[in-house]
Image (cartoon, helix red, strand yellow):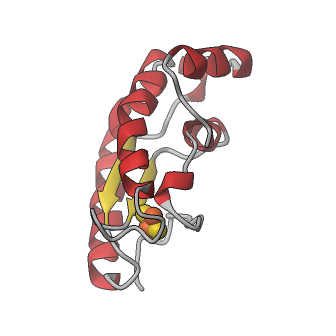
């Protein structure tokens, strides 16, 4: 499976396991963008994990936007484990879009863990 060399892959059992806090943490720790790859609709091994991830995405994008981060830096794509070519294309496209946005300037926003947790709670972000 070929993909952009500057992409770092973090494997989880299901996209439904992606907590919005993981995304905030990745951005706070130096990632310029986060791409979530989930199984296609109706193909999730855990039945509804991908739908759960999809429902969380607007909350996550709102959260990062309120932190001053362009929400295009977070993307969800349906791409299965068997779609190596497509995975490489999706990662390549996302990498180019993030490159066009430029590096995330962490000094543009101050990471406030307590504030981020409060935002998640206000928006009903569940961590299950
Ligand atoms: S197993 Fe749930 S999204 Fe792939």
Q: Residue at x 39, y 62 (%)?
A: 38
Q: How many marks?
A: 0
Q: Does the image show residue 115?
A: yes
Q: Residue furthest right?
A: 114
Coordinates of residue 1 in the picture (x, y in percent): 42, 86
69 to 115, vertically: above or below: below
Q: Residue at x 41, y 63 (%)?
A: 47
Q: Residue at x 57, y 39 (%)?
A: 27
Q: Residue at x 49, y 35 (%)?
A: 104
Q: Does the image show residue 69?
A: no
104 to 26, vertically: above or below: above
Coordinates of residue 95 in the picture (x, y in percent): 36, 57
37 to 83, vertically: above or below: above
Which quadrant would the C terminus be assigned to in this image? top right
> Closer to the camera, 7 or 124?
124
Ligand 1: image quarter: bottom left
Coordinates of residue 121 in the picture (x, y in percent): 59, 19
Coordinates of residue 102 in the picture (x, y in percent): 39, 40
């Amino acid at each position: 499976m070929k993909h952009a060399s500057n992409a770092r892959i973090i494997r989880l059992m299901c996209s439904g396991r992606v907590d919005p806090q993981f995304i905030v943490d990745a951005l706070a720790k130096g990632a310029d963008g986060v791409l979530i790859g989930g199984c296609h609709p109706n193909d999730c091994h855990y039945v509804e994990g991908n739908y759960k991830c999809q429902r969380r995405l607007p909350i996550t994008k709102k959260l990062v936007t309120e932190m001053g981060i362009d929400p295009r830096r977070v993307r969800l794509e349906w791409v299965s484990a068997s779609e190596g070519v497509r995975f490489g294309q999706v990662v390549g496209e996302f990498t180019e879009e993030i490159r066009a946005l430029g590096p995330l300037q962490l000094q543009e926003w101050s990471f406030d863990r307590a504030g981020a947790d409060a935002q998640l709670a206000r928006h009903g972000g569940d961590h299950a």
